[in-house]
Image (tube, rainbow, N blue to C red):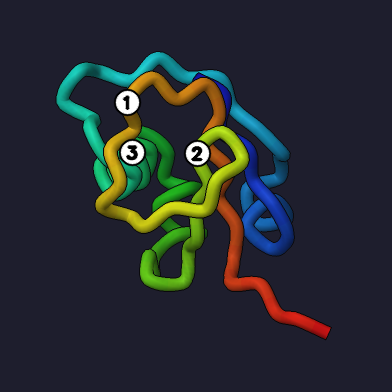
């Protein structure tokens, strides 16, 4: 699975993406964020306030409780503003 990072999340991590193989126990976006935080201290620090993190699965905006299913790409980013 490819994980994409955008805006200040990308800046804090110092990278724009990761390729990961997640265990079967990682079923939702929230599980994925938790699993990434457990395996990467920098990610844990960057996502300390997880309510600020938005997600998209295969280009579709989703909530944290959304199942990953057969996702190919998960994008993580801060809240968006209009203008």
User: From the viewer's perspective, is residue 71 above or below residue 81?
Assistant: above
Residue 69, given in percent of the width and then of the height, sits at 32, 26
Tell how many labels. Answer: 3
Q: Earlier in the sequence, mark 2 or mark 3?
A: 3
Q: Which mark is residue 69?
A: 1
User: From the viewer's perspective, is residue 37 above or below residue 83?
Assistant: above
Label 2 belongs to which residue? Answer: 57
Q: Nearer the viewer, residue 23 or 63?
A: 63
User: From the viewer's perspective, is residue 1 above or below residue 65?
Assistant: above
Q: Earlier in the sequence, mark 1 or mark 3?
A: 3
Q: Which mark is residue 32?
A: 3
Q: Nearer the viewer, mark 1 or mark 3?
A: 1
Callout 3 environment at 10 Å: few (<14), some (14 to 19), or many (20+)?
Answer: many
Residues at discs 2 and 1 in contact (Cβ within 8 Å): yes
Q: Nearer the viewer, mark 2 or mark 3?
A: 2
Position of 61 compared to 35: left or right?
Answer: right
Question: Could you say whether the residue bearing mark 2 is in a helix, strand or loop?
Answer: strand
For image coordinates 44% across by 60% down, the residue present is 47
């Amino acid at each position: 699975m490819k994980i994409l990072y955008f805006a200040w999340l990308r800046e804090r991590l110092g990278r724009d993406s990761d390729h990961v193989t997640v265990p079967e126990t990682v079923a939702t976006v929230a599980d994925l964020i938790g699993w990434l935080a457990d395996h990467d201290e920098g990610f844990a620090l960057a996502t300390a306030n997880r309510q600020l993190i938005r997600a998209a699965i295969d280009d579709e905006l989703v909530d944290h409780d959304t199942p990953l299913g057969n996702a190919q790409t998960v994008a993580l980013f801060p809240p968006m503003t209009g203008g």
